[in-house]
Image (cartoon, helix red, strand yellow):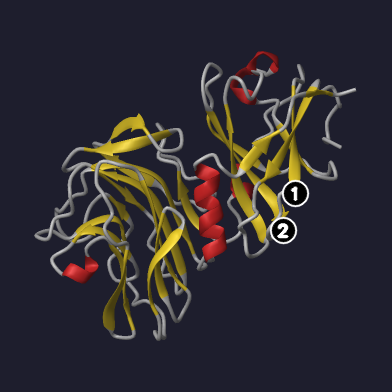
């Protein structure tokens, strides 16, 4: 069952509340949020290394990654689920724990496959979780409380430069952002930006690129708007391009779509920046968390479920059961 001596003492059923889902979610990364009152930390090993997740038929273990562990508070664990049926409120997996002899069972790169080109949780290490070899270099950002575990605070000129410089003809760009001030019409401020290939913007000289996802497609600059996104609060901003439509989403809902496009985004040799413009010293001010870049266009159902997963409304925790 677990591929190791079966001396786990406790288990819990985790049920997915996907009643609004319009399609099956295959290979879906689910965020499991553990906290006192829901989960008994006293029986776990240090840093949760005895956690194991099994599918509903007890096959597995499923790949998981512990993003942040706090045995006195909230812990954030990502699990790759093989498939969650559309409209389901009964599909589930199992969490096992309580083995005194278990080794570390994490397999982060398997959680973020396929399609994920770069996954940055933006914790203290700035490590990349998809295992693609992309590296992030920090330029003065500050460790801070994020939307999911830890995040980074950008105070004015601080930013992160990554080595991701791959042209992707189809994309999904995701970020949790907490802007410190309203958008600026006098500076091209990218939250996550590769310039022509994609740019997820906060401020911009051109109104239609303010608070928008933009790209250079078919010889023209095009954009889809996030709308009236507020500052001073967290927002989950996502931009996608599927080869014909550029879409913008906020907090799991589509806000704008530009259809009738064709071709790939223009090639661009720039690396990806978090918190600044690629070509000039214009900077985003605020908090950022959970930056992800995919070489596929995620669906509306996927994005809505990801938002619910990260806000704690997607997983229902059953009672603790003793393993006999």
Percent across and percent down for residue 309 are: 55, 45
Residue drawn where x is 23% and y is 52% of the image: 276
Q: Is residue 14 above or below residue 303?
A: above
Query: Mark 2 falls on what kind of element?
Result: loop
Q: Which residue is mark 1?
A: 91
- Secondary structure state at the residue bearing disc 1: loop
Image label count: 2
Of mark 2 and mark 1, the one earlier in the sequence is 2
Q: Which image quadrant: the C terminus? A: top right
Q: Position of residue 79 (x, y in %)?
A: 64, 43
10 Å neighbourhood of mark 1: few (<14), some, or many (≥20)? some
Is 299 situated above or below 72? below
Residue placed under numbered mark 2 in the picture? 85
Q: Is the residue 99 above or below the residue 318 in the image?
A: above
User: Residue 157 sits in which quadrant?
Assistant: top left
Q: Which mark is residue 41?
A: none
Q: Is residue 277 or residue 149 the one in the foreground? A: 149
* Residue 57 x %, y %: 85, 45
Q: Percent position (x, y) of residue 280?
A: 15, 58
- For disc 2, the neighbor class at 10 Å (few under 14, some 14 to 19, many from 20) is some
Quarter of the rendering occupied by the N terminus: top right
Residue furthest top in the image:
42
Whether residues under marks 2 and 1 lie with C-beta atoms below 8 angstroms apart, the answer is yes
In this rendering, does residue 107 appear at all?
no
Residue located at (63% from left, 25% from top): 38
Residue at 54% across / 26% down in the picture?
69
């Amino acid at each position: 069952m677990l591929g190791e001596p079966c001396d786990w003492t406790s288990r819990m059923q985790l049920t997915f509340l996907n009643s609004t889902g319009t399609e099956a979610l295959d290979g879906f990364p689910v965020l499991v949020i553990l906290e006192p009152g829901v989960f008994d930390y006293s029986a776990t090993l240090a840093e949760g290394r005895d956690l194991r997740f099994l599918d509903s038929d007890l096959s597995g273990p499923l790949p998981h990654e512990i993003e942040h562990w706090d045995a006195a508070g909230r812990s954030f664990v990502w699990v790759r689920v093989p498939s969650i049926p559309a409209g389901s409120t009964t599909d589930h997996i199992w969490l096992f724990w309580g083995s005194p002899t278990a080794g570390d069972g994490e397999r982060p790169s398997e959680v973020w496959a396929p399609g994920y080109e770069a996954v940055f949780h933006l914790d203290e290490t700035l490590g990349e979780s998809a295992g693609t070899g992309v590296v992030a270099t920090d330029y003065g950002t500050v460790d801070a409380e994020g939307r999911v575990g830890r995040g980074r605070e950008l105070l004015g000129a601080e930013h992160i430069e990554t080595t991701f410089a791959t042209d992707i003809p189809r994309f999904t760009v995701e970020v949790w952002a907490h802007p410190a001030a309203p958008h600026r019409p006098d500076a091209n401020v990218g939250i996550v930006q590769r310039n022509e290939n994609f740019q997820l913007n906060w401020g911009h000289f051109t109104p239609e690129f303010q608070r928008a996802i933009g790209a250079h497609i078919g010889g023209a600059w095009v954009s889809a708007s996030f709308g009236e996104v507020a500052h001073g609060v967290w927002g989950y901003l996502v931009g996608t391009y599927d080869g014909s439509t550029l879409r913008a989403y906020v907090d799991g809902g589509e806000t704008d779509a530009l259809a009738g496009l064709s071709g790939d985004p223009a090639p661009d040799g720039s690396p990806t920046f978090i918190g600044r413009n690629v070509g000039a010293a214009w900077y985003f001010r605020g908090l950022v968390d959970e930056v992800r870049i995919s070489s596929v266009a995620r669906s509306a159902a996927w994005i809505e479920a990801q938002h619910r997963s990260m806000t704690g409304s997607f997983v229902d925790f059953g009672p603790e059961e003793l393993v006999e």
